[in-house]
Amino acid sequence: MEQPGTTQRIAAWIATVPRDRIARAAPLAIEGMRDAIGVILAGAAEPVPRKAFAAVSRWGAGPSRIIGRDGALAAPWAALVNGAAAHVLDYDDTFAPLSGHATAVLVPAILALGEERGASGPDLLDALVVGLEVMACVGRGVNPKHYALGWHATSTIGAIGAAAACARLMRLDTTQARDALSLGVSMAAGTRMQLGAEAKSMHAGFAAKDGILAATLAEAGAGGAAEALEGRWRFVDLYAGRPAPEGSMLPPGENEALAIESIGISYKAYPTCAATHLSLDALLALRAGIDPGGITAIETDLPLVLSRNLMHPRPTTGMEARFSMEYCLAAAATQGTLTLADFEGDAIHRGPIRALMPRITMRGVPEPEDGPPPPTRVTLHLADGTTRTETRIERRGSRGNPMSEAEHDAKFRDCASHVLDAAGTARALAAISGLATGGDAASLVDTLVP
């Protein structure tokens, strides 16, 4: 008897994995939900989501509200706008198997669809964990090749993961979940050429919107190829150009840990491209106890695939500055921190920072074919002729180097302050914290609309 294909096996897992198994990861899912909602609140007033709202609102209102502002749209369009807000500040988490941003796609999708469908708090967390798991399955099959080829996995794998999360939220059966995945593959698009451009911010919104569309079409009976992930002209073949490692795409067995448990979500301590973070961690450790005015030059070596993301050595906008190693290191060296305010208005043109930027050198180190990436190294050259060097392999906010609960709380409160007052922030935190035992999508969003 022929074994079911990869897509069928993932779909069966989506439809049948016991809810009590997923519920054991609820505390981790709440952390992810909190971080994503925080960055959506911070990004809600930015130009990109405002432009997205202006574009799609002409097609009418709907039941799903826009976080951080007035307005409600059909679920796919609300997910697009909220996804753009989640990603616009580049403060959203990353997920290693995806090589991209997971909750910036999944949370806007399940909140918009959840509000339309009356989903409960536990339903939202369940769908988030399932979507993450499917992103891990697909990511293991195509990465690192997929990312190295220039695909923006947030948008490509993101559409497939969002389709899985929405299928789970809608309680689709195995055949419908398989069709949702297949349709999600047909929607997968987006390349890293958009880094530093407004389109890159919208990629998370596109994937969130596509996930809702794929699952809703599948629920209505619209079908796709039964095997969409492996084989000729399928996702792995086209988007990685080589077969997936044997067994890499299979979902976890009954006694195996979920990806959110074994790998975890990596949260951002700085509102910049993740490719800058190890260098920033190392620089800030070196900077302690020295006079920043005595720094004459900075060198950083990092994996080549990451250095290629940082394509704006002389940024002209705050968005470009998030993809500028020179700006990020110069700002952090000058002032000892890096915050949302450093990318707003004329902040990127400050004299002391601009004066240091030409004396910063970034070198990309080729990665081995197999094995871990090379470490990131930062060297400070000081006015007295001495040098200091620091090396990092695991960034602050990752599973192996976690941020403290106080840091997570401070990040959320800082992000939320762009939209909510202190009382509103407290209500939002309480609603997020209570998702595992009650609440629903509508009551949660009630706390996120000023």
Image (cartoon, helix red, strand yellow):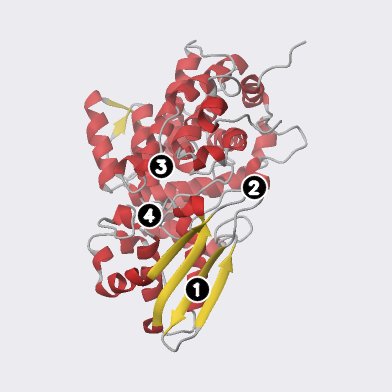
**Mark number, residue 263:** 2
**Mark number, residue 379:** 1
Outermost residue, bottom direction? 384
Residue 263 lies, in percent from the top left, at: 64, 47
Q: Give the crowd class for mark 3: few <14, some 14-19, many >=20 residues within 10 Å.
A: some
The amino acid pointed to by label 1 is: Thr
* Mark 2 → mark 1, Cα distance in angstroms: 30 Å
Which numbered mark, 1 or 4, is in the foreground of this view? 1
- Residue for badge 4: 323
Q: Give the crowd class for mark 4: few <14, some 14-19, many >=20 residues within 10 Å.
A: many
Q: Relative to residue 167, is residue 52 depicted above or below? A: below
Q: Residue at x 25, y 70 (%)?
A: 350
Quick check: 389 left or right of 117? right
Quick check: 226 left or right of 315? right
Residue 256 lies, in percent from the top left, at: 75, 38
Quick check: 284 left or right of 68? right
Q: Element at badge 4? A: loop
Q: Element at badge 3? A: helix
Q: Earlier in the sequence, mark 2 or mark 1?
A: 2
The amino acid pointed to by label 4 is: Phe
- Residue for badge 3: 192
* Mark 4 → mark 3, Cα distance in angstroms: 12 Å
- The answer to whether residue 107 is visible is no
Q: Give the crowd class for mark 2: few <14, some 14-19, many >=20 residues within 10 Å.
A: some
